[in-house]
Image (spheres, rainbow, N blue to C red):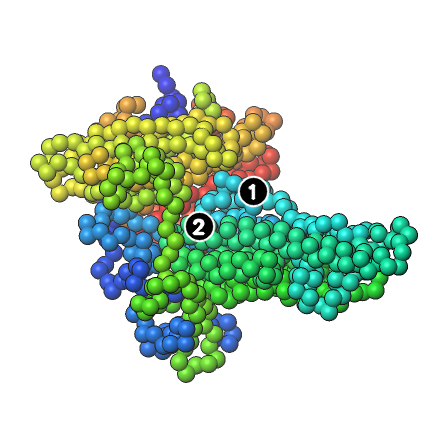
Amino acid sequence: MKTLYELFVISHYVAFFLTVLLVATAGRTLGQQATTPQDTDVLRINTDLVQSALTVLDKKGNFVDGLQREQFELVVDGKPRPISFFERIAAGSNREGELAALNNASDSTAKPPSAIPKILGRTIVFFIDDLHLEPDSLNRTRQMLHHFLDHEMSSKDNVAVVSASGQIGFLEQFTNNKTVLEAALARLNPRQYDAEGYSAGNSTKMTEFLALSIDTTRSNNRALNFYVEECMKGASTFRQARFALAAIRASCETQVRNSARAVLMQSAQITQNTYNSLESLMRSSARAPGRKLAFFVSDGFLLEAGPHAAAVRDKLDHVIDAAQRAGVVVYTVHAKGLVNSSFIDVANKRPVDGNARLDLASIGELEATQDALNALALDTGGRALRNTNFFERWVTNVLDETSNYYLLAWRPDKDEEKSQKLRNVKISVIGRPGLTVRAPRGYVAGPQPTPAAAPSSQKPTGSQAVKTPDTQIRDALTDYYPSAALPTLLAVTYLSTPANGPVVTSSMQIANSSVTYADDGKHQATIRLAGVVLNDKGKVASSFRNQLNVSPPQAGKLEGAIFYNHHTPLAPGIYQVRVAVRDEKSGRVGSAMQWIVIPDLSKKQLTLSSLLLGGQVLDQKSTSADAQVQLSVDHRFSRSSPLGYWVFVYNAKRDAGGSAQLIVQTQVLRDGRPVMISPQRNLDGGGPDPERIPFGDELALKTLTPGKYDLSVTITDSVAGTNVTQIAEFVVR
């Protein structure tokens, strides 16, 4: 006869819960229908409106609350404009999500499907300009990011670490999984470029600023004369007639100027690459809800690169416009830290000049390399940090000051829609000059570039391309943002099983009210689903597909949900699970994705399985091993019912008597602060499988207010003197 534990690991969430979690979950209805937002005066942003998020601060840097629409003055290109929409927003709030959903909505008049409620958080991007970042600066950047992950980030936040060079690869995605973000951070290595000119005597080292000085003669020819003399030293090794010196000097001057232009063109191309990566990030993040914060970390580069690289300045305008349209506020960090104009050549990019001519020619170089960072921050409504070696506290202050903001919108003139031009925007509070308004300072009006045409084999024959069901599912699986046309949720957990090792279970939940059944209420709905498991390099580790024939619910009972579970044995590592579903009758497609980190148990370190929340017996009439238990996918629980959970402990050490000595501590956290702490308990280290020690408990939720929480379970191994914590998110409704 099989033990209860064996039954559990064989079916992954079945009969084992009957004796442990049945009481905790009795009476809970699966897939309760979400309440829809109230019909309020909401904003519809489309081609006829321009929106701007702004923060108003007093002299002490505190957010000024309670301002009304009539207190603001909006001026575009020097002309006052009426404000069409105004509202005060809290970052990460549900209201912010509502406005974002309307912003992304199409003009279709069809009734949208019922959405599964989602608790929003802050959306934060750390854009690391590794193309302009020295090793010392990168180390300070790592310290800042580690501090953010350890002390500032909450489970509600959506964070991405992105590099200009793309060296982070597949991990450059939004997530609230700290392990994934730490892995992304670990991939950052110095990639600083070295723009070189042509041979100019004994030395070819030349900074961008010196090259610009030579190309535009901004430094009274000090730099030019230095490099020309260096060039002539190489030629003077041969005895030359005096009449030939003039020709040699002219040749060297031409060579130096060409060298300067080569340096500028190379560096401008690198800067273009940085701008291209940043603009691509801005435009793709437009689909993320609400206002986004981007921290742009760089050692700086030239705002103007001279007449031979004039497109660099224009490219910055397009980056600023992309940020405005995506609702991104950029805060720039000059990563060189505390330096001055006389000591900025840390990378040894220029030769030593005994006559200090290059030092004189380099006056203003530090400020010049900060100009682009200043413009990027100020024109998007952010701030620029410079001349400090410690960024952590500043990032904290930025997160605090941007937690609340005002959102306003206006209707542009028809003339603005005819040509592309950067429009200057100024927003102020009437009669209160002491207040600081941080808002985007411009946007590019006029027709926007259209996406590249599809290959001829994929071009539509009519007004719109017709995609096959397989193509729709494939597109949803390859998209970095989930599709909500068919509301779908995903929960991914792992267990270590005796037969297969680590097994990942992908649990899908589809809103029943969004599935199309026949009008007669007798015919089944057909749902096509597929999933893919990608490793940290973006390679396919596993995949699955299936088709579900779903019987119609009883009349008036559309509040339930459709569940599907898939089990995948996987090796230790970081994975992303993506799933897509399609309602065959309506053609609606939904998708979801989630990261999962599988530990390496062969290291013999104390480890926990995923936290398994809210087991519900699907067939409550059966108490046999054939009964099916479905874990909660949406992790939403009523205050009136307890929260049951389960976890397994791996690699517990044994004392001299062969017993494990484990202590359990459970906490409920909200925004990183404990709001409920259970007494410590000793965990019995025995059981049918001493390598996999189970622990289950239930928590009463009646004292918690509605909102998002973290369940934190810490296991302390008294024999080994180590502890490990597993965290799972849940929502109290």
- Image coordinates of residue 265 in percent, x first then y, are 62, 53
Q: Residue at x 59, y 51 (%)?
A: 270
Most extreme residue toward the top is: 1
Amino acid tagged 1: Gln
Q: Residue at x 24, y 41 (%)?
A: 462
Most extreme residue toward the front is: 243
Most extreme residue toward the right is: 239
* Snapshot quadrant of residue 721: top right
Q: Is residue 37 above or below residue 507?
A: below
- Image coordinates of residue 323 in percent, x first then y, are 44, 58
> Residue 374 or 349: which is nearer the viewer?
349
The answer to whether 248 appears left or right of 703 in the picture is: right
Disc 1 marks which residue? 167
The answer to whether 445 appears left or right of 681 in the picture is: left
Amino acid tagged 2: Asn
Disc 2 marks which residue? 158
Q: Does residue 282 appear in the picture of this structure?
A: yes
> Residue 350 or 152: which is nearer the viewer?
350
- Whichever of callouts 2 and 1 sits on the residue coming sooner in the sequence is 2
Estimate the spatial distance between the alpha carbons at disc 2 and disc 1, rounded to whole Å.
21 Å
Q: Secondary structure at mark 1?
A: loop
Q: Residue at x 59, y 34 (%)?
A: 719
